[in-house]
Image (cartoon, rainbow, N blue to C red):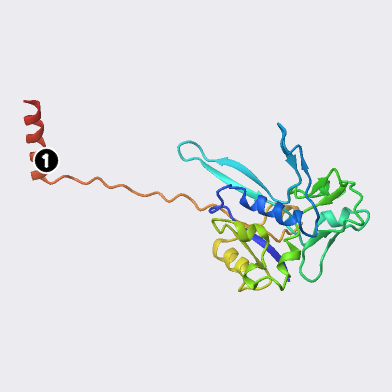
Amino acid sequence: MRLGLVVDLDKCVGCNACAIACKQWNTSGTSGSLTDYRPYGADPSGVFFNRIRHYETGNYPDSKTVHFPMSCMHCEEAACVTVCPTGASYKREEDGIVLVDPEKCMGCNYCAWACPYGARELDREEGIMKKCTLCVDRIYDENLPKEERKPACVMTCPTTARYFGDFDDPNSDVSIASSKRDGQELFPELGYKPVNQYLSPRKKVEIKQHEISEPDLVRKVKDWVNKVVEL
């Protein structure tokens, strides 16, 4: 089993609903509180598992803003796990989710430096590294209806730009979406084999415009009306 996400960059509108839902759920979940720094100050910040980057592509007037959500990719060859000196970072065999054991983490930052996706967040107040858990406490909660056993970010996305499922299951939502739109890994050349995939924005379709010649009678009527107006 390889649980992960597919994000459709064509649908994402950069509303940050996924980031807020993620923070709200995980603050009360297994990861404990996600600390805020200066929440009411001039430069508020804090711990987030999901952050949305914004990029401008193309040239005016054909430019386009691409909203790019990024969180832990749950890599198959996770460098963050390899470099961790205490074994706090680990990858679960049963579903492939990469997690951090807070009892073992000493906040050394090695995993954050090893991660090329910027997915690790050091909680400076607790001195513990934190990251996306795919809402592991939610997706296996049998008290929830089956259709709600998904990460908070997937549940809250207003444009259904996020999909969740098992990449080893060809009939899962993520496998179907990825095969239909040629899902792409982020930085595959690094060899970390990220599980999460992205669907690239579709190319703009050029619509040809055809000139429609006016019927001779319509043209004559217009000419007559113009002459009358001038008088």
**Residue toward you, 166 or 23:** 23
Q: Which residue appears at 65% of the width and 73% of the height?
A: 146
Quadrant in the picture for residue 219: top left
Q: Which residue is mark 1?
A: 219
Quadrant in which the N terminus appears:
bottom right
Tally of numbered tags = 1
**Residue toward you, 88 or 151:** 151
Quadrant in the picture for residue 191: bottom right
**Label 1: few (<14), some (14–19) or many (≥20) C-alpha neighbours in 10 Å:** few
Q: Which residue appears at 82% of the width and 47% of the height?
A: 112
Q: Position of residue 140 (x, y in %)?
A: 73, 70
Quadrant in which the C terminus appears:
top left
Q: Position of residue 221 (x, y in %)?
A: 8, 40
Q: Which residue appears at 81% of the width and 69% of the height?
A: 93
In the rendered structure, the answer to whether residue 25 lies left or right of residue 224 reads right
Q: Which residue appears at 91% of the width and 57% of the height?
A: 103
Q: Position of residue 116 (x, y in %)?
A: 76, 48
In the rendered structure, the answer to whether residue 109 lies left or right of residue 156 reads right
Q: Is residue 100 above or below residue 213?
A: below
**Residue toward you, 180 or 156:** 156
Residue found at the very far top of the displayed protein: 231
Q: Is residue 44 above or below residue 52?
A: above
Mark 1 residue type: Arg
Badge 1 marks a residue whose secondary structure is helix
